[in-house]
Image (cartoon, grey):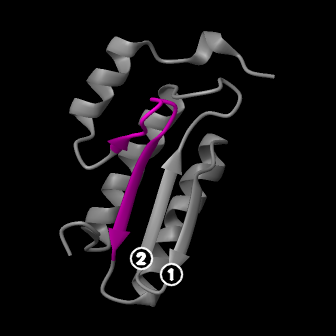
């Protein structure tokens, strides 16, 4: 069951979009999405392994997929029925990991 108390407000979602410019807010503002491109599969998988550890530590898990050197990520807080502060924290951790692994946004690559 959704917990609307966790949801970000419209203003907070706008702030989130400014703070995380590499992420796209979904049309219904219920999620943020980013696709990354890595040098190879090994780097993509190592990145996913690091993010998985951060996700476990924060008890917040991404919806994602991997195809060779690309990782598509969608963050939403299912419990809240939309975006929450958990998504902002995990997105920031993902961005930091992406830099460490030399990822580019798939739209730039």
Please, which residue is most extreme toward the left here? 108
Magenta stretch: residue 70 in it?
no
Query: Is 5 drawn above or below residue 27 in the view shown?
Result: above
- Residue sitting at 59 percent across and 17 percent down? 6
Q: Taking 61 as reference, is 85 left or right?
A: left
- Give the image location of residue 8, x and y in percent: 47, 17
Q: Residues within 10 Å of mark 1 (few under 14, many from 20)?
A: few
Helix, strand or loop status at disc 1: strand
Q: Is residue 9 left or right of residue 52?
A: left
Q: Position of residue 33 (x, y in %)?
A: 42, 49
Q: Please give the name of the residue rendered at 73% of the width and 21% of the height, measured from the top-left corner.
A: 2
Residue 105 is drawn in which quadrant? bottom left
Whether 27 is among the magenta residues is yes
Q: CA distance from mark 1 to mark 2?
A: 5 Å
Secondary structure category for the residue under label 2: strand
- Up/down of 102 relative to 18, above or below: below
For disc 2, the neighbor class at 10 Å (few under 14, some 14 to 19, many from 20) is many
CB atoms of marks 1 and 2 within 8 Å: yes
Quadrant of the rendered structure where residue 40 is?
A: bottom left
Along the line of sight, the residue nearer the viewer: 96 or 13: 13
Q: Nearer the viewer, residue 43 or 68?
A: 68
Please name the residue that numbered disc 1 is placed on: 67
Is residue 45 placed above or below 53 in the rendered structure?
below
Which region is colored magenta?
24-37
Task: Determine the residue located farthest toward the right in the rendered image.
Answer: 1
Q: Residue at x 81, y 22 (%)?
A: 1
Circle 2 residue = 70
Question: How far from the left and from the top, in percent, is residue 91?
Answer: 41, 45
Residue drawn 52% across and 69% down? 48
Count of labels in the image: 2
* Left or right placement of residue 46 versus residue 35 in this view: right
28 relative position to 36: left or right: right
């Amino acid at each position: 069951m959704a917990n609307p108390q966790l949801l970000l407000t419209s203003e907070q979602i706008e702030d989130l979009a400014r703070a995380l410019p590499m992420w796209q807010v979904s049309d219904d503002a219920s999620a943020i999405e980013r696709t990354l491109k890595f040098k190879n599969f090994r780097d993509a998988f190592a990145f996913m392994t690091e993010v998985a550890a951060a996700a476990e530590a924060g008890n917040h898990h991404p919806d994602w997929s991997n195809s060779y050197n690309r990782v598509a990520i969608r963050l939403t807080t299912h419990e809240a029925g939309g975006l929450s502060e958990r998504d902002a924290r995990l997105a920031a951790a993902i961005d930091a990991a992406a830099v460490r692994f030399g990822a580019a946004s798939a739209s730039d690559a």
